[in-house]
Image (cartoon, coloured by chain):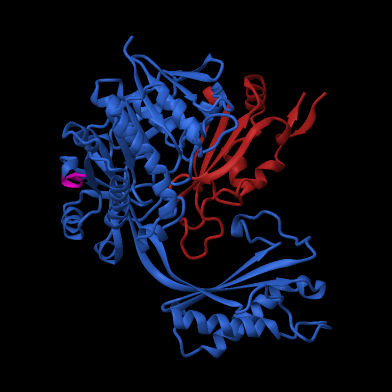
Chain colours: A blue, B red
Amino acid sequence: MKEIRVLSPVGMLGYGFPAESFQKGLEKKPHVIAADAGSTDAGPHKLGAGVGIVSKEATKKDLTLMITAGCENKIPVIIGSAGGSGAEVHLNWTSEIVKEIAKEKNLHFKMALIHAEVEKDYLQKKLAQGKIKPLGPVPELTSKDIEEATRIVAVMGVHSHIKALEMGAEVIIAGRSNDPAMFAALPIKEGYDPGLALHMGKILECGAMASTPGTTSDCMMAYLREDCFIVEPTNALRKCVPSTVAAHTLYEKSSPLHIIGPEGVVDVTGCKFEQYSERAVKVSGSKLKKSETINIKLEGASKVAYRTICIAGLRDPIMIKQIDECEKHVRKTVATYFSDIPSQDYRLIFHIYGKNGVMGELEPRKEITSHELCLILEVVAKDQELANTICAFARSTLMHYSYKGRVATAGNLAFPYAPSDIPTGAVYRFNIHHLIKVNDPDELFSIEMIEV
Amino acid sequence: MTNEVSIIDLVKVIRSKNAGPFELTFDIIFKDKETYEKVKKTKVITKELIAKVYHIPIEKVLHFVEFDPANAIKATIVRPVDSGSIGETDVYGAQQHAPLLEIKIPYN
């Protein structure tokens, strides 16, 4: 029987996984070991500021186990969305860690770096040619958006991973990648059904999350055959059941029926999820509808402001009842005092926990029933100095505001920290979330081979 | 006789999460096929209900799908603010599910 085996040690490189689970996975003789290192979940700051989601030490620990095992057993190791956001800075960061491991462990291999950061001039040309369109509920892209972005990445599919494998790469460190790509690349290269391979990749990208008890910090093994794939956590404490695997098919996607990627759309409408053995689930029926044109997702982040916050507790019941009026007073006093500063240069935001701090405008409950509130006073402004200044003024205004019926005249806020005001630096936003139409993915992704 | 049952007693999972930085998606996964089919038949959980629960216009509910293989109902809405932008309250979107826990299902 034809079969290819894929080991996913962890749902996010750097989250850590038990060495015993990994060993159990290796005993099943996987053909490839792959892990996802990225996400947009942590917000635009990672891409914008060029920083990672996990620490260097944590990344190194996971990579050491994976690369050592890969070299010993001649199994390719693929990391997708290196460094969290998969831009140049993230790719270099990860590649340096790999080189450090190789030096310390005296390992030698061919490493492919797949670049995913996109040149602005190239994008401007493509924009002018009408090749870029919005992805989801976002406005049309403008030339200014491209200019303002601090970094822009394109999200690669299996194409570039396959190419790197064909070039003889034993370790692949890829920039921003579609989540299933690193798991599906080798199977698709070997001629396995791409619909099943991509669906399998979607289940594997979160490690053992699709099992029960689910977690991203443990290993999942997949066995892809001609007409189905089977997934099983390698840790005997966990098991897959049809509902956990089916549920993971929906996870973090807007529509459950279609898994959309650069290769096309995987239709899972007719999928079957069956218990295969005690801890394994068999999935069949996923079908890839290849797209006729090549559309690649772009992600970009731009710097929009600087932030200062102040955290304070409120315990006075007379004040809690009037919290909305207190907020109004602070806003008015700030606007009057800083009337020489254009109002678009700063914004004052009240996060009131105990009222609607978690859900903001989506919160259906209007009444406050708590005996204490937490306030995060947030100021975003065009520079850090202005954010600090306005935050300090708003804080002292609220601290000493004589609201109606006040009896506690010493001060209105309980600060857990000194200093009370915390500058948090630059604020970014995802200003590019679009699709670009290309003739060849190689326009966007180049491969660099390194002998380590 | 028809009783009202809290949705909490009928589900395995109710969760919210980002589906990319611009959308927020809700998964309601029922205990088993039978429960799922019964709830589906009541037609209580609809696109309109999602709009009502979150006080948003119905156009902001981008997808509403019943997914039989997972015994699940899924809805996706436009995020009030794109993830991590100014005005954000929940970067991962993982705590926006709570109002769904208050849904009552007529059930016998």
How many numbered marks does the figure carry? 0
Quarter residue A6 falls in = top left
Position of the C terminus of chain B by quadrant: top right
Q: Is residue A293 visible?
A: no
Q: Is residue A69 visible?
A: yes
B106 horizontally vs A6: left or right: right
B81 horizontally vs A226: left or right: right
The magenta stretch spans which residues? Answer: A443-452
Give the residue drawn at x 31%, y 55%: A93
Give coordinates of residue A295: x percent, y percent: 25, 41
* Residue A308 located within the stretch drawn in magenta: no
Give coordinates of residue B91: x percent, y percent: 51, 55
Quarter residue A410 falls in = bottom right
Q: Is residue A259 above or below residue A121?
A: above
Name the chief secondary structure element in magenta.
strand
Q: Nearer the viewer, residue A245 or A237?
A: A237
A15 horizontally vs A297: left or right: right
Q: Is residue A265 above or below residue A372?
A: above
Give coordinates of residue B78: x percent, y percent: 49, 49
Quarter residue A193 falls in = top left
Give coordinates of residue A201: x percent, y percent: 38, 31
Give the residue drawn at x 59%, y 29%: A212
Q: Nearer the viewer, residue A148 or A100?
A: A100
Give the residue drawn at x 65%, y 85%: A397
Position of the N terminus of chain B by quadrant: top right
